[in-house]
Amino acid sequence: SYELTQPPSVSVSPGQTASISCSGDKLENKWASWYQQKPGQPPVVVIYQDKKRPSGIPERFSGSNSGNTATLTISGTQPMDEADYFCQAWDSSSAVFGGGTKLTVL
Amino acid sequence: EVLLVQSGAEVKKPGESLKISCKGSGDSFTTTWIGWVRRQPGKGLEWMGIIWPDDSDTRYNPSFQGQVAISADRSINTVYLQWSSLKAADSGMYFCARRDASGSYLDSWGQGTQVTVSS
């Protein structure tokens, strides 16, 4: 079965750039999506189709996908961005999630 | 945009059965894939399975096959997740989510249903 691997945690200072990686075999051949989840809330998509931002998502969120790695980049990270982030791709009709990355802004 | 509204929190005992629901708005609900995702404390998002409400075509994550049942009632725009005999290990937050028309991501999520199984 297909697997996606993320670092368990990333720390960033306010105003700096945070990068979260997501690795999977030939991931560039799949669409990668990224979800933000805060405690007690449902996930929210922040990036889809590798690099597209849904309406309402700040421009500081961006994405890329090349080779075996997709990357979520948050420029000018704000305290409100502290959350768990999950990458996701499709393996046939099944969604595959990465293990999640806890982003700490301190 | 499809709005997904889930049923309320449940507290059950081991061995009991449970059926939680996810009701969608909009004409396109029955012709869109609706999936279920679990989140347990200290763990990530787990994909459980997906259903096409119009004909109830269902695909399960092998890890959940036989452990849960996903069903739909197209007449009331509702998808269900069901257990016949709950275990403590089933405790967690369950989300329904819609696969977008392009099939590339999950664009709408329910608010979540907390399931607690404890003796």
Image (cartoon, rainbow, N blue to C red):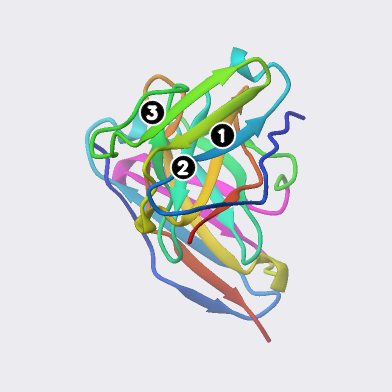
Q: Is residue A35 magenta?
A: no
Q: Which residue is mark 2?
A: A35
Q: Residues within 10 Å of mark 1 (few under 14, many from 20)?
A: many
Q: Sequence-wise, which precedes: disc 1 or disc 2? A: 2
Q: Nearer the viewer, residue B51 or B1?
A: B1
In the image, the segment drawn in magenta is: B66-84
Residue A29 at what x, y percent from top left? 61, 12
Report the amino acid beneath label 2.
Tyr
Q: In the rendered view, would you say A104 is above or below A89?
A: below
Marks 1,3: beta carbons within 8 A: no
Q: In the rendered view, would you say A88 is above or below A36?
A: above
Label 1 vs label 3, nearer the camera: 1
Q: Are marks 1 and 3 on the same chain?
A: no
Q: Residues within 10 Å of mark 2 (few under 14, many from 20)?
A: many
For mark 1, name the chain. Answer: A
Q: Which residue is mark 3?
A: B100
Q: Quadrant of the N terminus of chain B?
A: top left
Q: Is residue B71 magenta?
A: yes
Secondary element under disc 2, as helix, strand or loop, is strand
Q: Which residue is mark 1?
A: A88
Question: Given the current orientation, which residue lies at the most extreme right position?
Answer: A1
Residue beneath the point at 64% across and 53% down: B68
Gap between marks 1 and 2 measured at Cα: 8 Å
